[in-house]
């Protein structure tokens, strides 16, 4: 997929903007900062990252897990496309839709270390989850393994799949307490639900209720071992809702080992609101049936309809990308989000996010009356920090924090918890203010 000169310049500019913000800011990755001058310089560069967002300066925004504020290159790309559509909607749409959608797919593919055909664009994690589970070829008697701790979107999508196909959903208890759940036990608990009838394991990488991060690679390896003794048509597919590790962790799709990865791009990646992806592993999209006609594939379904031949050919990321008229200016600006964050560097983003979350967890666990629910270890957590305060409901805690201009949220589960989610747009000072605010409430 080629870009014209203007598109190339704009795309390169987003990556350069990200790289310029963090030039030299990975000193902590190479070694600790010792002098006050080094510490101040590093903090100043992260302040430049914060300055890329048009966030209200009088509020501590620890809500990256919910919905993004756009960094400057993304805002500018959205506005550029909006102006083009307002000036000449038909011509601008015809000239830009397929190239810009494919540029976004290519940027996502580069970010994940896969080919462009392995990426479909969606509107959200929810849409991606729905497309994958709706598209599975299951039959009566097949089984799908998930956990009791998975979010509503996964559970409801699986219920609908079972209702349509006659398959059965098996939910296993993943944990009672996250702090005592090691990777071997997590894998064992998931495999306890697997039988010869299992066709799908549907899991969440980072849980939005507790912040627990699943050992996805270990699960993938265990499933691969089971698949050794299965015929190809009965192999187990591993599907992963990865939204709360996406834009936080330094990984490629191969590192996770899943067959399908679904994530929204308007959370930790800070992409345009109303964007998301599905990425396919080595099997590609062949195990799925598309649910919505695509507007970007060349050949395939549309040509088969025009010619009357009826066979659209093999499935791929372009065909799995739903068509229809949308907020095109947001879809077309997605490439800039990937390039901006890649310019900063995935390793730097991961290190910074984990450092802030660790600082927050260390502060919270030292407060009497506060129960920290998120594991301390980086390999079992990401950016979400969940906790409870004795004698206060999560809704009351969030309300009181917002009175102090600190944006927290309530995990919308049967057992709710308070969540603070620091990201690269936050400072260590903001984390400390949040800790003291919780201390005052406790």
Image (spheres, rainbow, N blue to C red):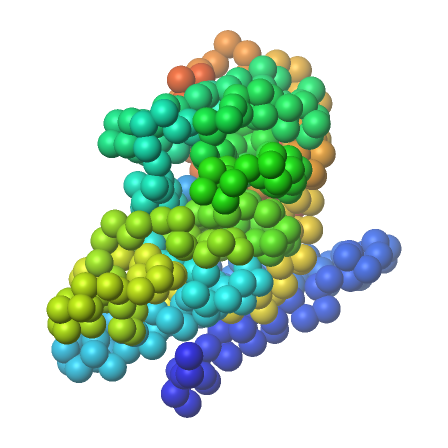
Q: Residue at x 50, y 78 (%)?
A: 13
Q: Residue at x 57, y 63 (%)?
A: 113
Asked if residue 275 lies left or right of residue 353, the reply is left
Task: List x then y, in percent, for residue 119.
Answer: 43, 60
Q: Residue at x 39, y 28 (%)?
A: 142
From the viewer's perspective, is residue 249 above or below residue 328?
A: above
Quadrant housing residue 90: bottom left
Count of all numbered marks drawn on residues in the image: 0
Task: List x then y, in percent, for residue 135.
Answer: 32, 45
* One can see residue 167 in this view: yes
Quadrant of the frame with the C terminus? top right
Quadrant housing residue 19: bottom right
* One can see residue 426 in this view: no
Asked if residue 163 lies left or right of residue 24, the reply is left
Quadrant of the frame with the N terminus? bottom left
Most extreme residue toward the top is: 391
Asked if residue 359 lies left or right of residue 124, the reply is right
From the viewer's perspective, is residue 229 above or below residue 108?
A: above
Task: List x then y, in percent, for residue 38.
Answer: 79, 61
Most extreme residue toward the bottom is: 5
In this view of the protein, which residue sits in the foreground, 84 or 185?
Answer: 185
From the viewer's perspective, is residue 347 above or below residue 220?
A: below
Q: Residue at x 45, y 34 (%)?
A: 199
In this view of the protein, which residue sits in the foreground, 333 or 312?
Answer: 312
From the viewer's perspective, is residue 67 above or below residue 376?
A: below
Task: List x then y, in percent, for residue 56.
Answer: 42, 51
């Amino acid at each position: 997929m080629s870009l014209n000169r203007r598109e190339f310049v704009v795309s390169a500019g987003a990556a350069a903007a990200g790289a310029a913000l963090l030039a030299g800011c990975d000193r902590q990755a190479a070694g600790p900062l010792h002098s006050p001058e080094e510490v101040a310089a590093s903090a100043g560069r992260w302040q430049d990252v914060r300055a890329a967002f048009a966030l209200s300066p009088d509020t501590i925004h620890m809500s990256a897990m919910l919905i993004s504020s756009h960094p400057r290159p993304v805002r500018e790309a959205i506005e550029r496309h909006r102006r083009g559509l307002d000036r000449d909607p038909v011509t601008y749409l015809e000239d830009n839709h397929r190239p810009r959608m494919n540029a976004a797919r290519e940027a996502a593919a580069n970010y994940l270390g896969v080919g462009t055909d392995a990426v479909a664009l969606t509107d959200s994690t929810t849409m991606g989850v729905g497309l994958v589970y709706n598209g599975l070829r299951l039959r009566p008697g097949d089984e799908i393994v998930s956990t009791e701790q998975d979010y509503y979107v996964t559970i409801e999508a699986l219920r609908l799949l079972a209702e349509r196909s006659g398959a059965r959903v098996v939910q296993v208890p993943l944990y009672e307490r996250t702090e005592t759940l090691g990777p071997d036990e997590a894998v064992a608990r998931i495999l306890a639900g697997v039988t010869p009838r299992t066709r799908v394991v549907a899991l969440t990488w980072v849980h939005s209720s507790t912040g627990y991060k699943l050992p996805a690679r270990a699960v993938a390896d265990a499933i691969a071992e089971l698949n050794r003794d299965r015929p190809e048509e009965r192999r187990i597919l591993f599907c992963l809702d990865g939204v709360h590790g996406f834009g936080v962790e330094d990984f490629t799709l191969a590192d996770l080992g899943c067959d399908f990865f679904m994530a929204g791009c308007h959370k930790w990646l800070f992409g345009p609101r109303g964007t998301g992806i599905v990425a396919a592993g080595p099997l590609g999209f062949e195990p799925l049936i598309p649910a919505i006609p695509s507007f970007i594939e060349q050949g395939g379904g549309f040509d088969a309809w025009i010619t009357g031949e009826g066979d659209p050919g093999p499935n791929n990321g372009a065909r799995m990308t739903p068509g229809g008229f949308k907020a095109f200016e947001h879809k077309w600006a997605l490439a800039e989000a990937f390039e901006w964050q890649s310019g900063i560097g995935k390793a730097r983003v991961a290190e910074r996010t984990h450092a802030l979350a660790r600082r927050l967890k260390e502060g919270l666990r030292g407060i009497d009356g506060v129960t920290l629910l998120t594991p301390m270890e980086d390999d079992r957590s990401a950016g979400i920090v969940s906790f409870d305060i004795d004698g206060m409901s999560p809704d009351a805690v969030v309300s009181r924090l917002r009175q102090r201009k600190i944006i927290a949220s309530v995990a919308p589960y049967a057992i709710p918890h308070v969540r603070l989610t620091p990201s690269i747009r936050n400072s260590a000072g903001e984390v400390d203010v949040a800790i003291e605010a919780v201390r005052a409430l406790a």
